[in-house]
Image (cartoon, rainbow, N blue to C red):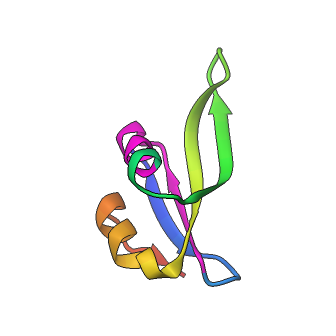
Amino acid sequence: MDNSLWYDAAGNIQAFTTDRAIMAKIRRSYDFQISATYYGGIGGEITALQYRVPASYSRTIRRMFAVQITS
């Protein structure tokens, strides 16, 4: 699965994932806002989501996504 994390201009973390298990975990346990929704395939199904995560959750999101935050 494709996961990536980076800081935006406002100092928040942008979190991109194609992993449906991570999407379900965030939906179930956290109140992160969706920044972008990526659609693909024949049925126009959701292929990836991008979340805006407060910087205070940096350790949590790094462990969940198993990647480091890039600049």
Question: Residue at coordinates 29% horizontally, 66% vertically from top-left?
Answer: 63
Asked if residue 57 is positioned above or below residue 44 in the image, the reply reads: below
**Magenta stretch encompasses residue 24:** yes
Q: Residue at (70%, 82%) from the top-left corner? A: 9
Count of number-bearing discs: 0
Q: Residue furthest top?
A: 42
Q: Quadrant of the N terminus?
A: top left
Span of residues in magenta:
12-26
Question: Who is closer to the viewer here, 2 or 65?
Answer: 65
Residue at 54% across, 75% down: 54
Residue 71 location in percent, x, y? 54, 82
Left/right placement of residue 53 relative to residue 38 reads left
Q: Is residue 46 magenta?
A: no
> How far from the left and from the top, in percent, is residue 3?
43, 55
The x and y percentages for residue 62 are: 35, 70
The image shows residue 34, relative to residue 59, as above or below, that is: above
Q: Is residue 8 above or below residue 21?
A: below
Instruction: Report the side of 25 relative to 50 (left or right).
Output: left
Q: Residue at x 66, y 33 (%)?
A: 39
Res 20 quadrant in image: top left
Above-or-below relation of 43 to 7 = above
